[in-house]
Image (cartoon, grey):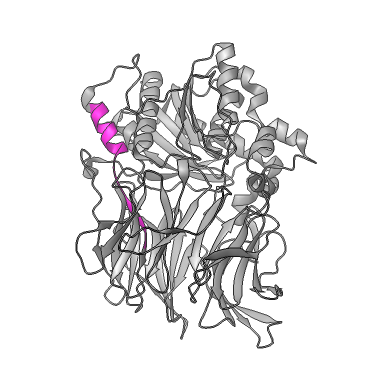
Amino acid sequence: MPSILRVSLSLVLLLSAAPAFAADAPIDPALEARIVAMGKVHSASAAQYSPDGKQIAYISTLSGSPQAWILPTQGGEPRQLTTGSDPVSGLRWSPDGKLAYAVSPGGGYNAQLFIGTPDGAPATRINEGEANTFPGDFAPDGRYYFRSNARSANSTDTWLYDPATGKAKLAVEMETVGEIDDMQGHLAVVNRLVTRGNNNLWLEDLRTHRSMLLTPHQGTAQSFGLFGKDTNTVYIAHNIGRDRMGLGRVDIAADGRTFKRTELAERDDAELDDFILDDAKRQALLKWNVAGRNELELIDLTGNTRRRLPAAPNDLVGSIDFAPDGSRVVLALSGATATSDLWQLDLASGTYTRLTVSPTEGVDLAQLVKPELRTFKAHDGLELSGWLYLPKDFKAPGPVVLSFHGGPEGQERPAFRADYQALLASGIAVFAPNIRGSSGFGKKFMSMDNHAGRFDANRDIKAAADFLIAERIGAKGRLGIVGGSYGGYVVMVAVTDYPDTFAAGANLFGMVNFETFFAQSTPWMGAISTGEYGDPKTQLQLLRDLSPIHKLDRVKTPLLVMHGANDTNVPVVEAEQVVAALKKRGVPVEYVLFPDEGHGWRKQANRVRSTVEMTAFFAKHLN
């Protein structure tokens, strides 16, 4: 999501491209090579059929950075379409067989949008300037809609590119963050965010800007929608009036002024992660999230009959897309011991066929560790869960690293994690909890950390550590903690609120000071975060009390801090404050700044470097 930079050269910058362990942490060369190999494991994802169904466009990391590739549907050699060093995302086919994609310079949010042909001819850039820009999709008439804060830094409006004129113009103004979910002719399903965890869908006429609210609700609710056979029908995933996401259908009256919603699918044990419709709008494929694993279901929309599909070969289903004839879907499947690859599912037979085999040279996937889902109690009795990874021949109690996801509305799932497997190869267990505020467990659970509720979420950190000690999994004095983005904030809370609990911590692009986060993060990010963290205009004391920056004098835990120089989501000043304060107090701190990354690592060399540095750091302090 563009770029406010503040890079202090007075701090220690570790910028060498070659991954290497710290000199004071000697390690077996074979183990080092294995960890480097895990950081180089490739993936394939984000697949979409061409309009004629003969080709599949997708994103692969084979070249070292996410790039666009094309694969013949009936088999054959894949072909690389984009060849740059900056990451590519948002790959979409146009109705006439062209391809749109985004290139993110330096890994930041100032994406450059292009439309080109699948033969690799030079593509045409369709946006201008350096605004925060996010890729979108094509309407059936060939126009392309995308998001940008070019008009106002406080919002991401929807812009519409018309290939007939070669120009993009402002289509929908937003107060904060929003987008078009779907578009037919001059009508659009417009998704407007109220605050994080709460949004509305509107049926909007893009010519007159007359709109009708499709999702009236009390309290908070989330939703996204797609048009059915015509603009009088909208299928929506939502949790209006219930705790978990399900599927409904909105039927709009002929006068366009009233509507009726019918519920089609919901589950008490699962959340609807995503759904797609086939081109004929006769089928819907539903992706359910069941405690972190995915299940697939097919709905015949003509008769509203539901059919559970055979289990996928791996736990997690990423992107999904229907073939033009509706007989097959292409999916990105992955799991704890399987990197993301493309598979094709024949809906009639229920047969999965693998389409890509991403290289895993130097890594025996069969030797990787699958996690076990464990539950534990918070200080107030709330049931929490987490994924426990134990090294082979682990002698408990032993060293354990607790890993916390970002968001905070993210969810820890049994995904392929090179960093986890690297720690496991070093004899260090990993426990990845979902504390209150995580998604995937209903909106009530997700909202439990809002505002002052964050104090209870922060106590969940200690509850997770206490669980490991009580179960004799982790040894006292040998617990580490790691997290990225909001997970980095969790790390800093842990080492300030519980300074005797953790022997080492790794803060990856995490916030430490809510005041500077709101002041220096890109404005639209701050605007949508007040409902989550607090409003700096009216709740400044709460934000100060929640900010670890004011308690750094308590830190005695050695820290590793890693950040991207182009990060505008959590500006690099958040890392600089920590490093400077701890160096001044003589607390051991190591700092790695990636000059060509934004919020997270997208280039292979940097992912490898991060994995190697983190593994060496924890091996030094926990083993």
Q: Residue 49 versus residue 293: which sits nearer the camera?
A: 49
Q: Residue at x 24, y 32 (%)?
A: 34
Position of 26 relative to 428 (above/below):
above
Q: Quadrant of residue 580?
A: top right
Q: What residue is shown at x 50% (from left), y 59% (from top)?
A: 126
The reply to whether the magenta stretch includes residue 46 is: yes
The correct choice, above or below, for 175 with respect to 546 in the image is below
In the image, is 385 to the left or to the right of 420?
right
Quadrant placement of the C terminus = top left
Q: Residue furthest top?
A: 586
Q: Is residue 290 left or right of residue 154?
A: left
Residue 44 rendering spot, x and y as whole percentages:
32, 53
Instruction: Give the total number of marks visible in the rendering.
Output: 0
Instruction: Pick whichever, 6 or 281, lies toward us.
Output: 6
| Residue 547: percent from left, percent from top | 66, 31
Q: Which residues are magenta?
A: 31-47
Q: What x and y, as percent, mark residue 4?
A: 60, 37
